[in-house]
Image: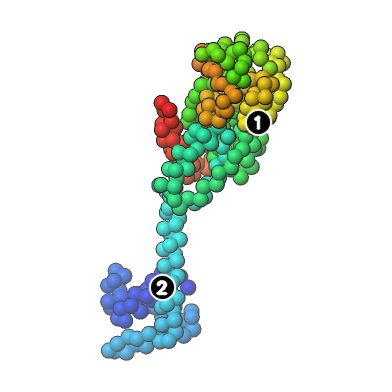
């Protein structure tokens, strides 16, 4: 049984006239009659009672009419669903993000999806840059938001594409009673003398490399007293007076009164980047990146 045959059958069932059904289908009557007869032979029972004056449905024809209408409605629904999927209007997207994106670009992206793509299932996963890289390589993540440039291939040799979406200054977070906390900015030579709360390079390769580059000191000369994964933990150690930590300026939103964020001299910056596999390039991925840029523009001048 073919979909084409069901369409032919429904046209005759609704018109109850082979000639009018043929006109509606933009075909001649003989081929239509042949197709309906073949359908009846395949099913094994007559669908129509034919006479010189009228055409009526048999009980089997009435039943098939109901079922065929439901089948064609479902097919049309699937066709529309796939059109929306291909256009990036529906589907599911798994997106990873570093914690600092949660108080910069991510809220705007979520709001844009709610407003313009409500039918998309957006799965948001808080992950370090390194964890996102692994999941992108394993195919369990569609797109990530990472901090600073990282190697162009995941461990599985999946080629990745990076795109900068937001840039901000780096600051040194210090206890309010620290001598450097009263400065309008501090030099890197001054801040490297302060004990440092650092981060594991295996999980945050781009960011750790960027901070090391900005400090301009050999990694083994920096006095790292604690190494943590979460910046909230780092800030807890800063508040306890253990030292300083270097973070994006947007961290000011998280700072308690006991911590001051002091910009680094020469205004070094850090970047949030969208990263996704080079192939296949999904319309939903492009939509997510477009919304990232739109959300970032909303942060300008904040």
Vertical position of residue 174 compared to residue 34: above or below:
above
Mark 2 highlights which residue? 69
Residue sitting at x 41%, y 33%: 298
Residue lying at 72% horizontally and 21% vertically, measured from the top left: 225
Disc 1: which residue? 233
Report which quarter residue 260 is drawn in.
top right
Q: Quick check: 10 above or below 155?
A: below
Query: Compared with residue 185, is residue 168 higher up or lower down, i.e. above or below?
Result: below
**Residue 83, image quadrant:** bottom left
Q: For mark 1, give the secondary structure.
A: helix
Residue 241 visible, this angle: yes
- Which residue corresponds to the image point at 47% horizontal and 50% vertical from the top-left? 120
The mark that comes first in sequence, 1 or 2, is 2
Horizontal and vertical percent position of residue 64: 44, 79
In this rendering, the label closer to the viewer, 1 or 2: 1
Separation (CA) of disc 1 from disc 2: 61 Å
Along the viewing direction, whichever of 175 and 165 lies nearer the viewer = 175
Camera-nearest residue between 248 and 61: 248
Front one among 297 and 84: 297
Q: Quadrant of the C terminus?
A: top left
Q: Position of residue 271 (x, y in %)?
A: 52, 26
């Amino acid at each position: 049984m073919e979909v084409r045959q069901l369409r032919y059958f429904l046209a005759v069932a609704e018109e109850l006239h082979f000639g009018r059904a043929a006109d509606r289908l933009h075909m001649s009557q003989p081929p239509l009659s042949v197709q309906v007869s073949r359908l009846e032979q395949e099913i094994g029972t007559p669908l129509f009672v034919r006479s010189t004056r009228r055409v009526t449905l048999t009980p089997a024809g009435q039943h098939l009419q109901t079922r065929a209408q439901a089948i064609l409605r479902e097919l049309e629904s699937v066709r529309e669903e796939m059109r929306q999927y291909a256009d990036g209007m529906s589907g599911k997207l798994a997106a990873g993000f570093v914690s600092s994106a949660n108080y910069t670009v991510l809220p705007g992206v979520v709001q844009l999806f709610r407003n313009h793509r409500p039918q998309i299932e957006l799965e948001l996963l808080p992950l370090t840059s390194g964890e996102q890289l692994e999941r992108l390589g394993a195919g369990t993540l569609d797109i990530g938001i990472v901090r600073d440039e990282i190697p162009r291939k995941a461990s599985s040799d999946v080629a990745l594409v990076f795109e900068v979406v937001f840039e901000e200054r780096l600051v040194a977070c210090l206890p309010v009673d620290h001598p450097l906390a009263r400065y309008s900015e501090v030099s890197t030579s001054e801040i490297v003398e302060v004990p440092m709360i650092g981060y594991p390079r295996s999980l945050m390769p781009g960011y750790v490399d960027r901070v090391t580059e900005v400090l301009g000191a050999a990694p083994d000369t920096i006095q790292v007293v604690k190494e943590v994964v979460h910046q909230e933990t780092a800030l807890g150690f800063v508040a306890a007076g253990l030292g300083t930590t270097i973070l994006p300026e947007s961290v000011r939103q998280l700072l308690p009164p006991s911590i001051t964020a002091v910009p680094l001299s020469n205004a070094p910056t850090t970047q949030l980047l969208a990263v996704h596999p080079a192939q296949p390039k999904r319309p939903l991925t492009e939509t997510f990146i477009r919304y990232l840029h739109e959300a970032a523009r909303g942060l300008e001048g904040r």
